Image (cartoon, rainbow, N blue to C red):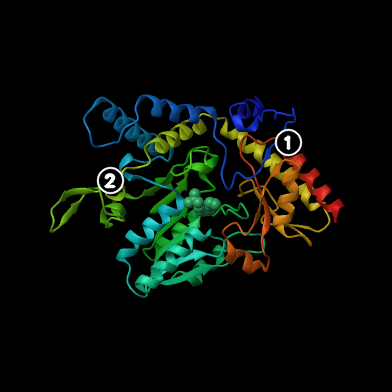
Amino acid sequence: MAYDVAAVRAQFPILHPVAADDGTVRPLHYLDNGATAQVPRAVLDAMVAHETTARSNVHRSVHRLAEAATRAYEGARQDIARFIGSQPAQVIFTSGTTAAINLVAHCFGARLRPGDEVLVSVLEHHSNIVPWQMLRERSGIVMKALPATADGRIDLDRLDDLVTDRTRLIALTHAANVTGAVTDVARVVAAARAVGAEVLLDGAQMVPHGPLDVPALGVGFYCFSGHKMFGPNGIGVLWGREDLLADMPPFMGGGEMIAHVTLDRTSYAAPPMRFEAGTPPITPAIGLAAAARWLAGQDLAGAEAHLKQLTALAIDGLSEMEGISVIGPTGTQARMPVISFTMDPLHPHDVAQILDSHGVAVRGGHHCAQPYMDSRDIAGTVRASLALYNDRDDVDALLRGLHEVRALL
Ligand code: PMP
């Protein structure tokens, strides 16, 4: 059966704008999913149901609501574990990908010594660059970066000369947020294993496309954000291999991360609690689990084929337009539906602003990837990032809008 995009769209209230008082309806072609995706009714309902029937703190009181909240929160951990093929004890709730990477930089980083090397790439989001620079300031580690290929992929041919016997961690994006390029994880893991290093993958742009068997990837750490996978914001996940988590000191100190506290010393809880100090984001975790269940229940093979078609359509349309250069792979293999381009001589912000006046929401700028923009000698790109509810109308509106931008010049 053909992929039923209309049935998917119908589940997202925001995609069906209501008329304003004067009767006008502003169209919405939402193509900024790489920044934040929208939420389906099922996720909103799960959060409202929790807030209205079981709101309480978790792991503390013994009353009925507290027990219901604890069950729901730990149930959410189990759902996320199932979604990524893991055990619940290896799932740590954080506030997002950024917090997850900072956690690893602090806690795994605490074991690193001056001269130990962390290898990133020039295509990383700032959240996978700055925490390592901060660790470098604290601990004297050495940071190296893989360059990018001309078509916007991490240049893995350079692994041979950049991985050394001092490499302790290779921290890379699983799918690049500017170019959509998907990283060949097996190659990275092989290079890391050859020198006994670990791999961290930033899955922020990967996980919105469906469940993954994270342990089978062979990496040490994996992280992602709820708000990009049809869940709420303020919640994300760090997955860590059991032995690595067991060996790491805590990140923040406070309630829930302890085994026993005296005024002289504290012993710490086992993972995952060791890394979840304070009241956790309970309702967001429940929303995230609902998003994971919702996503796993979609026609994902159909969505993938549908998004490949839309990506090809968008890239073909862009390639025909004067002054536009696609920044990233121009094929549909090993790439996500994230399409960046420049439009000479306009600044990406101006293009995004004009598109907005046509009801097309895209992002224009450096996308928190300034090192990559510098490496291409550009100020930024316009980025159209698609999700499984986008349809041909959205891509047509983008291309039509760009023709109108061109006509204004
Ligand atoms: N990594 C990538 C690849 C991203 O696209 C983003 C979000 N733009 C992040 C990390 C940061 O995610 P968050 O802001 O949710 O922590």
Whether residue 313 sits left or right of residue 155 in the image: it is: right
C-alpha gap between disc 1 and disc 2? 45 Å
Give SS at disc 1: helix
User: At 70% across and 40% down in the image, what residue appears?
Assistant: 310
For the residue marked with disc 1, what is the amino acid?
Arg
Whether residue 328 sits left or right of residue 160 in the image: it is: right
Looking at the image, the residue that sits furthest to the front is 21
Kindly indicate whether the residue at mark 2 contacts the one at mark 1 (C-beta within 8 angstroms): no
Of the pair 8 and 360, the residue shown nearer to us: 360
Whether residue 255 sits left or right of residue 332 in the image: it is: left
Whether residue 146 sits left or right of residue 317 in the image: it is: left
Give SS at disc 2: helix
Q: Position of residue 347 (x, y in %)?
A: 73, 60
Residue 273 image label = 2
Q: Where's the N terminus, which quadrant?
A: top right
For the residue marked with disc 2, what is the amino acid?
Met
Q: Tell me which corner region of the image, top left, top right, bottom left or bottom right, holds residue 397.
A: top right
Q: Where's the C terminus, which quadrant?
A: bottom right
The residue pinned by badge 1 equals 392
Of the pair 286 and 331, the residue shown nearer to us: 286
Q: How would you rate the neighbour count of disc 1 (Cα within 10 Å): few for under 14, some for 14-19, many for 20 or more? A: some
Any part of residue 188 in sight:
yes
Q: Where is residue 155 in the image (x, y as percent from the top left)?
A: 58, 64
User: At 26% across and 51% down in the image, what residue appears?
Assistant: 254
Relative to 89, is 302 above or below?
A: above
Any part of residue 148 in sight:
no
